[in-house]
Amino acid sequence: MLFLNKRQRGNGPKKNKTSLRSRILLLFIAMWFIVTVVLAGIAIYTQVQAAQSSAVQNSAAQLALTKKTIEDTIKNIDLVGIRLSNAAQVHRLADETYDDLSDDEKWLQPLLIRSLLYEDDYTTQPGHAVTLLLRCGDGRIYSNLKGGFSLARDEKTLNIARLISEKPISYGGYSLDVGVLSEDLLPSDTLVYRRRFPSLQNRQYFSEVIILTNRTVFLSKLKYRGSTAEEWGILNSEGKVLLSDRPEWIGENCEDLFGVDEASFDRESNSVACKNLSQLLVYYRNSDSRLVSINILSRTRFVRSAQGIIAYVVALAALCLVVFILLSAYLSKRLTEPLRKLGRKMYQATGGDMSVRFEPRFNDEIGIIGNQFDTMVDQLSKSMRRLRETEREKRKAELLSLEMQINPHFLYNTLSSIVWLASEGKNDDVIGITKVLSDYLRLSLSKGREFIPVRDEIDHVRAYMNIQNYRYANEVRMLFDVDAAALGLFTPKLLLQPLVENALYHGIKSREAGGGVIRVCASLCGEHLRFEVWDNGVGMSGEKCAELNEALANQRAHGVGTGTVNSRIKLYFGNEYSLSYRRQGDWTIATAVIPQMSEESIHEFVDRGR
């Protein structure tokens, strides 16, 4: 707190001192503009609702005017059906006693029915040509589809009659439907009238009169009188569109088209929302004719009718909105800019830049957080410096310990071998082992460098094994399989020699017979450099290798050849790199994987190790 107070006192006068809470309250005060927008929305909604109510009333009134026209039209065609179903000629032709007639009478009956059609006033009016089908109770079909009224034998006429007759007839003895069988049988704009009638002798024997007429006959009569209304239609008792100024609606179900089912028509006249919310369906039910007149209104019509008041309200709301946006932009910038600056500083700090400082301008809540951040970065920077020093000293101590563990005992044995060879008068061998020892010591020191070329590390291992073979009379055969591309890369010093020493002392020397082989491999694997040390000594079992690998992964392994090498690899390159062991046939294999390093990239890993 003493540090914080000093920083605060150094910021000069406190005339700019405002709390974050005060600025947030200013933002809330600016929100009164939302009230203006809400009120504008309510005004627009009220006006549109009034326009909608007026449009619905007008549409319902127009639909009501069509009632008599619909009734007259249906009565005209129903009158033709009644006349035919009651005509003696039709009963005589359709009756089950037809087979009792003579051939001349059978030939005469269709002609008599044809004359009935021409006597009817409605069917002789221009454009009212009636197509008649008579389906007798015993299955005979008569039709004038082919011209004269006669017994139908062609497949098309029979299919038309069969498909029409499969549909049930609603109450009242007749039905009016649209002929949506298939375009190749019956055009979709054909209206189908049907009336069933029983035989005079047998009330269980029913025949059927089917009258087909084109819907265009009715369009001129069913248009709203004195109106140019569009998107209207006539529904039958099943909710199917019989007539409409929209040809694509014909034959479709009202629920499929507009999402309005028949149960929605629960009044004489009303309006219902369509599944497309931008549309409104106005209906008028004709209870005595069982038909429903509908008109589809677009809600945009209501908006257009209220354009005057809407334009005024929108202009006022737009003005308030502009002011609100400008004020919000100013306040949001004042509020968020310090937070953004603090966020950027934190991001830099997480990237490792401990020189960043926030240095707040105000002594509000954000300023307090910024001061605490600066204090934290200062302390963290000091801690990281101490940690790097500690890690560097630890690494140097480990490397020095490794060299001290390797060199004294090894030098003692080597010098003993030189003395013995000199006493035996083997001067050439003394010269050879002394030269190899000189190379070994020179490579071990490496001028104090922590990273050396792979070539030098291989030479160091080769010198070490040459000295050992002088001591053990070349009992161990040393093989090198090194990728030429790997020789110029760099590796931590003393990475392979401890592994080779482990292979010699814990593997090869345990063999009862000779023939020991140690193989050193270095290869490139993607972006990695892979070292392997193979030995055919007694070595470890697969279970033992697994236990050692687990210890290495958790950095619990001890010893020069495993724990130290593994910890150095992780220290330099991270936990994704490590030392591992496996058993393959007669071989025990130690594998160390490190990144590929050039001389230019060494400093990156040296810094990480620190």
Image: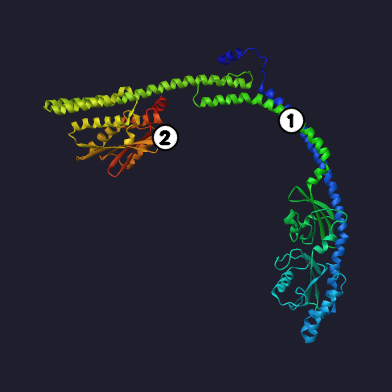
Q: Toward the viewer: 9 or 449?
A: 449
Evaluate whether residue 290 shows in this view: no
**Above or below 19: residue 269:** below
Q: Position of residue 434 (x, y in %)?
A: 19, 25
Distance between mark 2 and mark 1 Cα atoms? 56 Å
Q: Earlier in the sequence, mark 2 or mark 1?
A: 1
Q: Give the quadrant of the C terminus.
A: top left
User: Residue 576 got which mark?
Assistant: 2
Amino acid type at mark 1: Val
Q: Which one is closest to the eye, mark 2 or mark 1?
A: 1
x 27%, y 35%: residue: 503
Left or right? Give the position of 30 relative to 454: right
Figure colour scheme? rainbow
Secondary structure, mark 2, is loop
Quadrant location of residue 103? bottom right
Residue position for label 1: 322
User: 294 and 402: which one is in front?
Assistant: 294
Residue at left offset 53%, top offset 25%: 348
Left or right: 181 in relation to 487: right
Q: Would you say residue 121 is visible in this rendering?
A: yes
Farthest front residue in view: 126
Asked where in the image residue 368 lies, by quadrant, the reply is: top right
The kind of residue tagged 2 is Glu
Is disc 1 surrounded by few (<14), some (14 to 19) or many (20+) residues within 10 Å?
A: few
| Residue 390 rendering spot, x and y as whole percentages | 41, 21
Query: Quarter of the image holding residue 567?
Result: top left
